[in-house]
Image: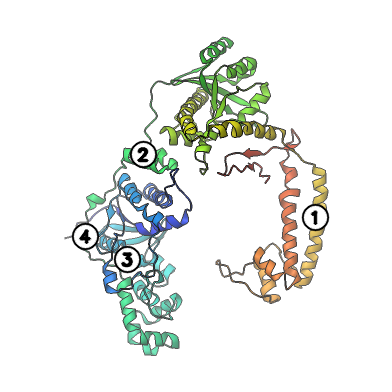
Amino acid sequence: MNTPQSGRLYLVDGMSHIYRAYYAIQGLRSKKGMPTNAVYGFTNMLRKLIKEEHPEYLGVAIDLTGPTVRHEQYEGYKSTRRPMPDDLASQIPYVLQVCGALCVPILSYPRYEADDVIGTLARKAAGADLDVVIVTIDKDMFQLVNDRITILDTRTMLRLDRKGVEEKFGVPPEKVVDVLSLVGDSSDNIQGAPGIGDKGAKQLIQEYGSLENLLEHRDEVSRKTYRESLQQNEALIRQSRELVTICEDLPLELNLEQLRKCEPNQAVARELFAELEFTSLLDEFLPPPPVAEKKYSVLQTPGQIAELCAELRGKTAAVAASFAAGAHPEGCVEGMSVAGGQGRAWFLPRQLVESQAASVGQLLLEPARVAMHDLKPFYSLVSCFNWKLPPDIRDTMLMAYLLSPNQSNFALERMVIEYLGTKLSAGEEEGETPTLFGEALANATNEKADLTLQLFDRLQPQLVEKRLEPLLVDVEMPLVEVLASMEKDGVRVDCEILRQMSQEMEAELNTLTNRIFELAGESFNINSPRQLALILFEKLNLPQPKKTRKAGHYATGFEVLEQLATSHELPKLILDYRELSKLKGTYLDALPRLVNPKTGRIHTSYNQMVASTGRLSSSNPNLQ
């Protein structure tokens, strides 16, 4: 007897999402070299599903190792499929641990596949008047859809009900198996009907209503190749039907209490994501920052600065500054903080920094060693107030970069999570803090300095152990000052020469345009790949390259035009036009607009932490 239920059951096709994540995310590894790309992609998918769908019941179906009943039915089943890559197989145990940490049950059944587990539980749940959502990217699952069961593709969040399946696949759910029986599945080595493809299979099922009716009337099929394939391969087609049909009657109990979504195990998730180095995921599982023993204060008088100088003399300290938005290169600071360990930090408001600049400069020289996170912007203050920095100064952002050069985000917020297992609590986010004022600004800046000092204490032993300290001290730290100076000085641009060159290039482009139109026999939008393709391949009948994937349009990229240029003048002129147009738009016209009106120069930012090779880049604007 079925008892009516409320809520919705989500059944996740685990294997398809694991494989998709493995191939979609390339090169992600931990510091120890352990591959983590599949685990990371799968975890993000699962978290997104939980966050956006709020499932009451949830389970992830996973294939077990070993042969299945389909291998018994057909010895060649999946025989052409390559074994699971070693660097994917090593991640499966971690996927299972992620599910456990997030309180998501793993569903499987010996000798059957995840599809069969999903099919069985979906039917039982639907029979108990429970709505079911199958989370998959596999079209084979379309056969399970009915009035209670729908499909959800997490890539696009596209939902398919009965009508949606028919619109997307061409036949209603109950006829999906008929189509798959004819088409087969090359990835699983399911043969189907040789010579009948996806389009033909759908047309045949639409015309004859079902596979059985089609086989019964196969002699009446008008297309010879289809007719002969149906006549000669009935046994193969029926075998394919058995293989593509998802089992819906496994002896599995629908235990909704076991499938009820519960809260993640915070401690387990925290430990697991720390091991996997998923800093962005670790954030939400961190405990609240300890309330304890933060001794933050605000300095108001010159005498307090003198007292702090004495307090920090000969010790290790950390400095943090909060800049106003858009301050570079003028160096407008909203305030700065100095941390001295044991949760102590002192905030100096802007007015005090500006009025007591000499005393603040002396304060920077008192500690034996000073740590900052992202030192380069601080050089704008050094220049503005004519300060000197102590000989032994360390940038914790550079230290983290040297320890993990393949990472891309070294913001203080991320490093605190990764190395200290905590997070900023004073309203501070990555980047500048232009929206904070008064006490909130003081607390945020004090906390930055405090955590920077803690981060330094954590990173310094690792740097020494890995013998990277000389690289930091002798190469990276001196380079910071050089780059800061380059950013401040900027790049002088002769706008008048660029304007003249732009006009000359405009004339060249006009000449090229006229010649292109002459060769084409008509005017058209040279920048439109579609219009260009019509001219090249339909009007001029030049050799046609392969069509691109989107909408069957012909490719008109560099390689295609370069090949065509050997036999016709027009493609060569198009290449010349594109090159000149790019030079004009990207440099001659764009650079003058990037000049700072106050300095008459372009001030870019030079990025020191972009690649493990040590390569530099520039941004805001990109001058590479």
Task: Tell whether label 2 touches label 1 (CB within 8 Å).
Answer: no
Task: Tell whether label 2 touches label 4 (CB within 8 Å).
Answer: no
**Residue 457 percent coordinates (x, y):** 46, 27
Q: Residues within 10 Å of mark 4 (few under 14, many from 20)?
A: some
* Mark carried by residue 270: 2
Q: Is residue 92 above or below residue 80?
A: above
Which comes before the other along the chain, label 1 or label 2? 2
Q: Write down the quadrant of residue 565 in the picture.
A: bottom right
**Residue 595 percent coordinates (x, y):** 73, 39
Which comes before the other along the chain, label 3 or label 2? 3
For residue 217, side relative to residue 552 (left or right)? left
Q: Secondary structure at mark 3?
A: helix
Query: Which residue matches tag 4?
Result: 252
Q: Residues within 10 Å of mark 2 (few under 14, many from 20)?
A: many
Task: Tell whether label 4 touches label 1 (CB within 8 Å).
Answer: no
Q: Secondary structure at mark 4?
A: loop
Which kind of residue does numbered mark 2 sit on?
Answer: Arg
Mark whose residue sits in front, 1 or 2: 2
Q: Is residue 159 visible?
A: yes
Query: Which residue matches tag 3?
Result: 144
Mark whose residue sits in front, 1 or 3: 1
Distance Cα–Cα, label 1 vs label 3: 62 Å
Query: Which residue matches tag 1?
Result: 505
Mark whose residue sits in front, 4 or 2: 2
Which comes before the other along the chain, label 1 or label 3? 3
Distance Cα–Cα, label 4 vs label 3: 17 Å
Q: Write down the quadrant of residue 196 in the picture.
A: bottom left
For residue 254, side relative to residue 329 (left or right)? left
Q: Is residue 242 above or below residue 35?
A: below
